Image (cartoon, rainbow, N blue to C red):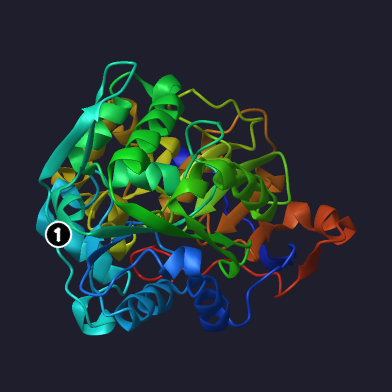
Amino acid sequence: MEQLFNGIHIPRMQKVRQSFARERVSDIAGVLQNALNQEKIIGTINTGDRVAIAVGSRGIANLPQLISEVITAVKERGAEPFIVPAMGSHGGATEAGQAEVLAELGVTEAVTGVPVVSNMDVVQLGVTESGFPVYIDKEAYHADAVIITGRIKPHTSFRAKFESGLAKMIAVGLGKQKGAEMIHEAGVDNIAERVEEAAKMLLDKSNIVFSVGVLENAYEETAEIAVLPGDKIMKEEPVLLEKAKQLMPSILFSPFDVLIVDEMGKNISGNGMDPNIIRRNYSGSVKHEPLVQRIAILDLTKESHGNANGMTNADICSRRFFDKIQFAATYPNPLTNKIAQGVKIPMVMENDSLAIKAAMKTCFDVDYSRMRIIRIKNTLELEYIYISEAMLDEAQAHPEIEPAGDLDYMTFDQHYNLF
C-alpha cells in the first residue's frame, strides 16, 4: 500500500508559541479559604454532618489541592467529609472504574485523607414537569450535605445557559449512569433543557449546600474560583460560563489542510478532542466554521483507560491509537447518550508516518509541496504548536505568534512513530 503515497513528503515543521490572555489565581489556597469561610457557605455545615464532596471525571488544574482545601474547611466544622464520583456513565459506568478515574486525577484517600465512596446506585427524587425521572447518587442522598465541585466551560455538543459546569455536574454527574441516560433520552437538542430542569429539582429536593466552580485560562491555569451557595448556582453559572468562553485557547490559523493531534482522551475532553478547538461536532447540534480538511490522531491518553469516545472526529488514526481502544470502556458513553456515531473508527494506518501521509493524501485541491499542516499535543495544550514551512509567512505577520524553535523535519523511531 505504501506505493500509494509516492510523491507525498511530510514537510519541515517549526515550533511556534501562541499567546493568549493569562488571568490567573496566584494564591489558590488563600482565595478558596476566604471564599469558603463566609458564613453563608461554611455555615451550612454542622458538627457531626456526613458531607459528600462530588468530584467529576474532567482534568482540572490543581484539583487535588482544591478538594483538599474543601475537606479541611469541612473538617474544621467538626463534620465528616467523604468523596463521591459525580461522572454519569464515565469510568465504564462501574464503581471501580469511577474510583480509578478519580485516582488518575490525583483524588484518592491517600492524598485527601478521606474515603472515596464509589457507588452506582441511585435514588429517584421525583419526576419533572416534562415527565422524566430525576436521580441522585445514593451516597450523596443519604449524606447530611453535598458540595459540588467542577470546572465551568463551554460544552462540546450544545449551546445554552448551562453547558459543561455545575448544573450539569448536579443533573448528569450525580445522576450516575441512570441519570445521565435520562438527560440524553430525548436527544442532543434537548440536553440543555433537561439539565436545567433536573438541576433545579435536585437543588430544591436534595441537600446540596454549596458549590466550588473553577474557570481556567488558555494555559490550563486556575483563572477564577467561584464558591456559590446552593440557591445561587442557577443564577450565577451563566455569567461564569460567558467568562469561561472568553478564556478559551484556540488555533490561531484558519483554514489549513491537516491537523496532527499527538493524543486525545477523556481527561482532555468529553469527546477526546474538544470540538470547540477542532471545530468539528459529530452530533451536528453545533455548527462550526470549518478549520481543517483532515485530522490525524496518533495516540490515546493513559488516563482514558481505553475510552476512545469522540474518535469519529478524526479522519485517520495510527495503529498505536487503535490498539489502545477498549470497547468495554468506550461503548458505555454512546449507549448512555445515544450518539452512536461518536465511536465510529477512523481509517487505521500502520504507523504515525503513514497516518500523517494518509491525511495529506486525502486532502482536496492542494499542492503537496506546500501543504498547510499543524501539529498539536492535544486540544488543551495550545501554547506551543508546530506549523509547516508553508505557514511561516503567516505566522511572522501574526502579533500573537512567535517562533520557538528551528525549522526541521519531524523525527520518527524505527517503527515510523513520532518520538
Horizontal and vertical percent position of residue 57: 32, 56
Q: Is residue 273 visible?
A: no
Residue at (23, 58) in percent of width and height: 305
> Would you name the residue on which mark 1 appears?
118
Horizontal and vertical percent position of residue 179: 23, 35
Left or right of 202 on screen, residue 223: right
Residue situated in front as seen by the camera: 366 or 139 = 139
Residue 55 occupies quadrant: bottom left
Q: Is residue 110 above or below residue 36?
A: below
Left or right of 171 on screen, residue 273: right
Horizontal and vertical percent position of residue 202: 32, 40
Residue situated in front as seen by the camera: 60 or 406 = 60
Q: Is residue 47 above or below residue 415?
A: below
Residue at (67, 28) in percent of width and height: 365
Q: Residues within 10 Å of mark 1 (few under 14, many from 20)?
A: many
Residue at (55, 31) in percent of width and height: 160
Identity of the amino acid at label 1? Answer: Ser
**Which quarter of the figure is the N terminus placed in?**
top left
Horizontal and vertical percent position of residue 310: 37, 40
Give the mark count. Answer: 1
Q: Is residue 312 visible?
A: yes
**SS of the residue under disc 1:** loop
